[in-house]
Image (tube, rainbow, N blue to C red):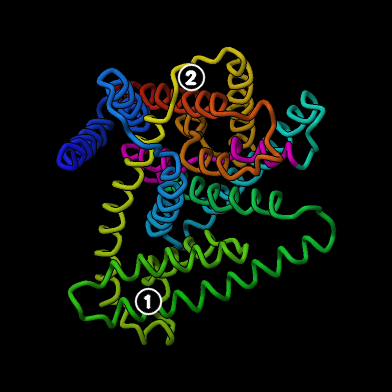
Amino acid sequence: MIGSIVITICALLLLAYFFDLTSSRTKIPSIILLLVLGWFVKQITEILHINIPSLEVALPVLGNLGLILIVLEGSLELELKKENYPIIAKSAIIALLPMVVMSFGIAYAFYYFDPLLSYKSALANAIPLGVISSSVAISSVKNLNPTNKEIITYESSMSDVLGVIFFNFVTLNPTIEASTFGYFFLDLVIILVVSFVATIGLAFLLSKIKHHVKFAPIIILLIMIYFISKLYHLPALVFILLFGLLIGNLDEMKNLKFVQRFHPEILNKEVQKFKELNIEFTFLIRTLFFILFGYLIKTSEVLNTDTILWAIGITAFIFILRAIFLKVVRLPLKPLFFIAPRGLITILLFLTIPLTQRSQFMNNSLIIQVILLTVIVMMVGLMFNKKEKLES
């Protein structure tokens, strides 16, 4: 039995790797194939009457680990060069403002049609739908030109971080008043100090460890600091983002005397190896998460007619706002307009909504349908972009 399970998991991971290799040619986002693969495995287990224990408890665990590794991967890729500052500013705007407007807009709809729901609870339900998933976006734009790829990486990474901060601010505070904002900014200051101190310590370890196992302890410490920060309701993803940005941009800071103590020319080589290892870990965790989510999907949830109009309306709202804000910041509509997928972060935040605050409209069906619709729009857009390249 154990051998069969191991063989099955290995086969699924190899299939996922094949999907990742071929996605650049087929233009089919790997998330769709992974969800279908997971769903297909579930059908086989039911047909063959294979008894598998409940796996739902593993979903948030894989989701949190995936979120940490994905944000770390994105932040390690970002270059803080002076010529990139305009792109960073524009990416921050299209990461934050559409998410805020969308969240308040969808929250109003939930509040209007669900009289038992407070507006604060409606907002907690709406935020997961407003966040772009870096786990889907970054892995889907490998073939875009460097500028567009950079914009998507900046935007989706910041969307994840800002979305989690916004969500926690709404759900963790029973009431929102003036003092709430004061405590919120105090939390930000604390996590910035923690991030700075922890980054120095981890960078020192990275440069000094001579043992043949050096990267696994760094990743374990990152995960541990993240979850300790979460226990104290601090915006823990800020730490992951800042750590990746700082150690990934040593070249930009090598003239600082403080940085020179870490021998940046040596540390850079270690960071490159660390980045490659993190990419491998991220692939495994992200793959397992989406296969498991696909396994837990019920066919009736995908085809639920009670939520499909809501899903179409929310998806339309997502792309209307995206077009407006891309125009405002003067970024090209093609292909950026199409790349606003929902995914891991949406699922993770949805699972975190307290049951006492959940709307009757916010359920598995709505989440699955919005994810699929946004990913299909992205797939069509990337296919169209391919045709455009061929014509040119």
Please tell me whether residue 15 is drawn above or below residue 158 in the rendered image: above
The residue that appears at 33% across and 79% down in the rendered structure is 205
In the shown orientation, is residue 32 left or right of residue 269? right
Badge 1 density bin: few <14, some 14–19, many ≥20, Cα 10 Å: many
Is residue 129 covered in magenta?
Answer: yes
Label placed on residue 302:
2
Please tell me whether residue 191 is drawn above or below residue 291 in the rendered image: below
Q: Quadrant of residue 114?
A: top right
Residue type marked 1: Ala
Please tell me whether residue 252 is drawn above or below residue 22 in the rendered image: below
Q: Secondary structure at mark 2?
A: helix
The residue that appears at 36% across and 71% down in the rendered structure is 251
The quarter in which the N terminus is drawn is top left
Label placed on residue 286:
none
Residue located beneath label 1 in the image: 203
Closer to the chain start, of discs 2 and 1, is 1
Residue 28 x %, y %: 33, 26
